[in-house]
Amino acid sequence: MVFVCLTDSAPAQEIRYATWNISTVAGTGTRGNSGVNGPATQAQLSAPSIAHYNPDGTLLFWDLNGYARIDADGTLRRPGFSGDILGQRLNGNYLLRDTGSIEEVDPSFNPVGRFRTLTSGQDCNNGIREAANGTAYCMTSRRQIIRLNAHGASSFGTTLNIASATLFAVDSRGAVYSLFSGSLRYISTTGTLISVTSSNSQDFTDGPASSRAIANIDDMAFDADGNLLFLDTSNSRCRLRMLTTARNIVTLTRSSGACGYSGDGGPVSSAALSTNPLLSKLAISPNGDVAIADTQNHAIRRVFNPSATSMSIKAVSNAASFEIGYIVPGEIITAFGTSFTSSGLESAAPANGVYPTQLRQTRLLVDGVPAPLIYVSPDQLSAIVPFAVAGRPNVRITIENGSDRSPQFLATIGGTQPGIFTLDGSGRGLVAAINAQDATINGPNTPARRGSVVTIFATGLGTLSPTLRDGEVAGFNLSNVTAAVDVTVSGFTATVTYAGSAPGLVAGVYQINFVIPDRVAPGDAPLRLRAGLNISRLGLTVAVAP
C-alpha cells in the first residue's frame, strides 16, 4: 500500500497514481452514529472531517459524533477524547488548544508537555503545521500565517506575506503554500511570494499550473515525494488533484469531477467523491496511503497501491524510550512493520569490533547506506542511524529482505532525541543505572546515596567528538557528546561529570555520569535528561537511599 517514486517527471507521477485503487474504510454512506467496536465499514458516521494518520498506521478522524479511530484491523473505536486538535507534529504527536498555550500529547493522548506559550490576543486556532527542519507555522483566527518562534522566545513569531489565507501546507524545505487572493501561492524559504496558479484564468482543467485556475481547496498535504495533493471543489466539482513537482496539475479522481459516491474496489481515476468545502480533509499515511474525509458521503475513503509489497515499515522509534519522533545521528532506533525476516529473532554480534549491516538476508538502508544492525525479527528490528545524516532535513529508510524491499519511510532528522534505557526495557520506570559507590545496579534494594555518582545509559544524544565509525564498539579513548547535556533528579539540577561514548558498548549507546543532588528525597526520584533542546520522556526514576 505504498508507492516508490522513481522519477520526478510528470508522466511517471500520473501513471503511478492512475494504478492506485480506492475503497471505503469507514462508513456506509448513510448518516448516523453506530458501529463502535465493530468493523468500521459497517459503522454509520456523520459528516467526517479532520483526518490524521498515526505513526502505527491507525487513522484518527472527527465527525459530528466526536473523535474516532480506525485500528489496524479495521475496527472503529471512539477514544472518548474531546480536546481541540490544532495539528499534528512530524513525530505523530498532536497539538491541542488550551488556555494561553498549545499543549502536546502523544497519539494515545498522554501529555507530553507545552509546545508554545501564548499571550493575550495570540492564537493558532486555524491550524499548525511543522516543516521537516522543525520550524512550526500556524494560522490565526485572523487568517494570518505565522512562523512561530522557538520555545521560550519572548514574541509570538513572524507574520508571513500571506493575508486572508484559507488553509496552508509546508513542504520539506519549509516553503509555505496557501490559497489566497485567487490563486495558489507560496512563501519561499527566503521570504519571496511566488504564484503557482493563475489568478486571471478560468481554466480548471489539468495542465501546467501557471495557466490554470484553482478557486477552492478543501485541504492539502505533501506526499513523501514532494507532490502537493489537494481536495478541489472549484467550479462546483469534487476532485482529488495533485500539483506535481514538475508544476503540472493532475486530477486523480474521475476527470469530469462530478460529485457522487462511486468507484470503490476500482481505480481511483474512476472514483467520485462528495467533499465539503468547509469540512473535508485528507491525510497521508506513513506508508503513502491517502485518506479522504468524504464528508457529504459520511464516509472515510482510502487511496492505495494494490500491488505494493507485503513488507512495510509502520513506525520508527527511539530504541530506549520507544518515542516516535525525529531520528538522530548515531541513535539506536527500532523499526516496526511486517516481513522484515522469515522467522524468529536473531541478534547481532560485533566482528573485529564492528556490528554488521546484514543479518540473515535483512538490511536497513538510510538514504541507501546500510546501517549497523542490533537484531532482526519478522515484525521488529533495531539498527543504528549512520552519523553522516547530521545536517540533513530528512532521510528515506528502506528495509531489504533478500530481493524483497519495503516502500520508503520518510524520517525527519533532529539534533537530539534523548531516550534512557530502563531496567525492564519498557522505556518507563527505573532506569538502567550503575551506582559508582559500589558498582551495583541501581534499584530499590541498592539505591544510590545522595552526593554519589550514578551512571545511566541512553541513545539519541547526537554527534560525538572525536567521531566514531558507524557500528564501532567504543574503546577507552573517550568521545564526548557535542550537544549540551544536563540532568535533573526530582527537579534538582545534578552535576554531570561525563557524557559521551560508553566503553565496551556500540557507538550509539551513550554513558552519562552525574551526582545525585543532596536535596533529593529518598525513594524513586523522577529523572530527566536534556540533550540540546530536547528532554527525555516523563515517567523515569532512579532509586535514592534515605
Image (spheres, rainbow, N blue to C red):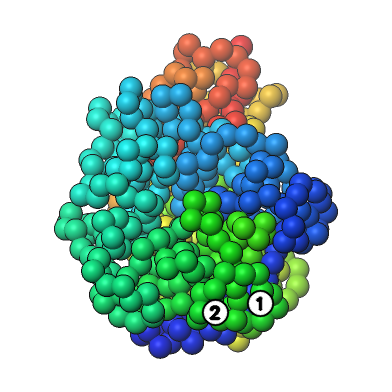
Circle 1 sits on which residue?
263
Vertical placement of residue 71 versus 528, above or below: below
Where residue 118 appears, as percent x and y from the top left, is 36, 27
Residue at (48, 11) in percent of width and height: 519
> Judging from the image, what secondary structure is the residue with disc 1 in?
loop
Look at the image and tell me in which quarter the C terminus lies.
Answer: top right
Residue 223 visible in the snapshot: no
At label 1, the amino acid type is: Gly
Q: Is residue 383 left or right of residue 228?
A: right
Look at the image and tell me in which quarter the N terminus lies.
Answer: bottom right
Q: Nearer the viewer, residue 266 or 217?
A: 217
Residue at (57, 21) in percent of width and height: 525
Vertical placement of residue 539 versus 347, above or below: above
Name the image quarter holding residue 466: bottom left
Q: Nearer the viewer, residue 223 or 292?
A: 292
> Judging from the image, what secondary structure is the residue with disc 2 in?
loop
Q: Which mark is residue 315?
A: none
Q: Is residue 344 left or right of residue 316?
A: right
Q: Nearer the viewer, residue 48 or 151?
A: 48
Where residue 195 appears, as percent x and y from the top left, is 23, 65
Residue 129 visible in the snapshot: yes
Residue at (42, 28) in percent of width and height: 101
Residue at (66, 28) in percent of width and height: 443
Mark 2 to mark 1: distance in Å? 9 Å
Vertical placement of residue 65 versus 394, above or below: above
Circle 2 sits on which residue?
254
Where residue 288 appears, as percent x and y from the top left, is 54, 69
N-terminal-most mark, 2 or 1? 2
Mark 2 vs 1: CB contact within 8 A: yes
Where residue 35 appears, as percent x and y from the top left, is 81, 51
